[in-house]
Amino acid sequence: MKALILTDGKAGHENQTRAFVSALSLDADVVKIEFKNAFAKALSYLAGALPFAFTRFLYKSLPVDNSSKYKLVVGTGSGVFHAVRSLAKAFGAKSAVVLYPRGYRLSSFDCILAPAFDNPASRANIVKLPANFVNADSSFYEKGVEAFKARYTPDFRPAIAVIIGGTNSSSTMTAEWMKKSLDEIFSKHKGSQFYVTTSRRTPKDVEAVVDSMAWDYKLIFSRDKFNPIPAFVMLADVLYVTAESTGMLSEACSRGTAEVNALDNLKLGHHKFRRFLEQLTQAGYIGGKKKVDLTSSVEKAREILKL
């Protein structure tokens, strides 16, 4: 049995889809698709009942060959939701999407895997997730640790790792806040070894603060695109992650044995990022070492899809 993964090219979306398909133990082909323009995307919300031939005109290209080999069409994010359900129908396959397809007919998908923080409806085809899907392949993390150790050799001291994201519509991040937060971490964990990584979203003045401090291992993303996060997750005794980073928080709460803490840079209001942080905290994933296990969610999806 084979799956067709549709991706919008965003790593955070594609990685979740790959992780879900891997958890189902399915082989997959991956195809990147793209709407022709913003109007085409807007039109996709209205095009659910229209024939596949029309659907094709919304995208720059769509896969059409060897369709009979696919038993499942799956994807993550609004850039692929419409194509997943349309191609699945055209191929006679099952459809599954990760994240909540708000604005689309929920009944038109065979299975929806939606984060609980999106407050999804209670329907037979919806599986609520406590966190995002993350890579379930142990070899991925083993390789990440190996690559990290080629750059830095950990010693006997406890490892404290800090993962810094950036800003979005529901969060903020200032140099002053970052300096205060990091000073508190250094003070709390005296005698430890300290790792840090920034990201593509980290503001330049925040990067400057991070760069100015004494780290045992430091990665400034604007200068170095190496990804130390898999190693941080597996090697750290304590992990700190900025609260707007739902993907990185999900990974930290799903793998390794570290105590996970959130650096709360969220704006006031009961938005989805705040709900996500509160749900993880209430469940014991933040502030402790309990790890998210999505096995039961995957099995429920398997039953829904009859795979």
Image (spheres, helix red, strand yellow):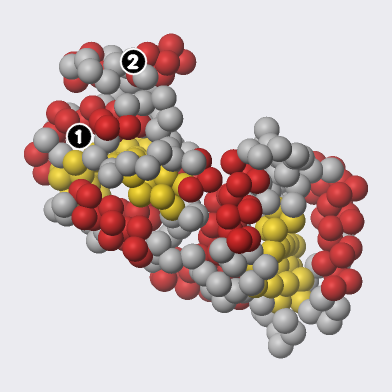
> Which one is nearer the viewer's eye here, 214 or 273?
273
Residue 56, horizontal then vertical, whole percent: 25, 19
The residue sitting at 47% across, 73% down in the picture is: 142
Residue 27, horizontal then vertical, whole percent: 23, 55
Task: Please give left or right for residue 111 compared with residue 246 in the image.
Answer: left
Residue to which mark 2 is pinned: 46
Query: Counting residues from the N terminus, which is met first, the one under dot 1 or under dot 2?
Result: 2
Q: Which mark is residue 285?
A: none
Residue 218, horizontal then vertical, whole percent: 74, 62
Residue type at tag 2 = Leu
Residue to which mark 1 is pinned: 88
Q: Quadrant of residue 201 in the image? A: top right
Task: Please give left or right for residue 54 compared with residue 271 in the image.
Answer: left
Query: Helix, strand or loop at disc 1?
Result: helix
* Quadrant holding the C terminus: bottom left
Q: How many marks?
A: 2
Give the CA distance from mark 1 to mark 2.
18 Å
270 w.r.t. 240: above or below: above
The residue sitting at 27% across, 20% down in the picture is: 48
For the residues carrying marks 1 and 2, which lies nearer the camera in this image?
2
> Which one is nearer the viewer's eye here, 162 or 279?
279
* Residue 138 visible in image: yes
174 w.r.t. 143: above or below: above
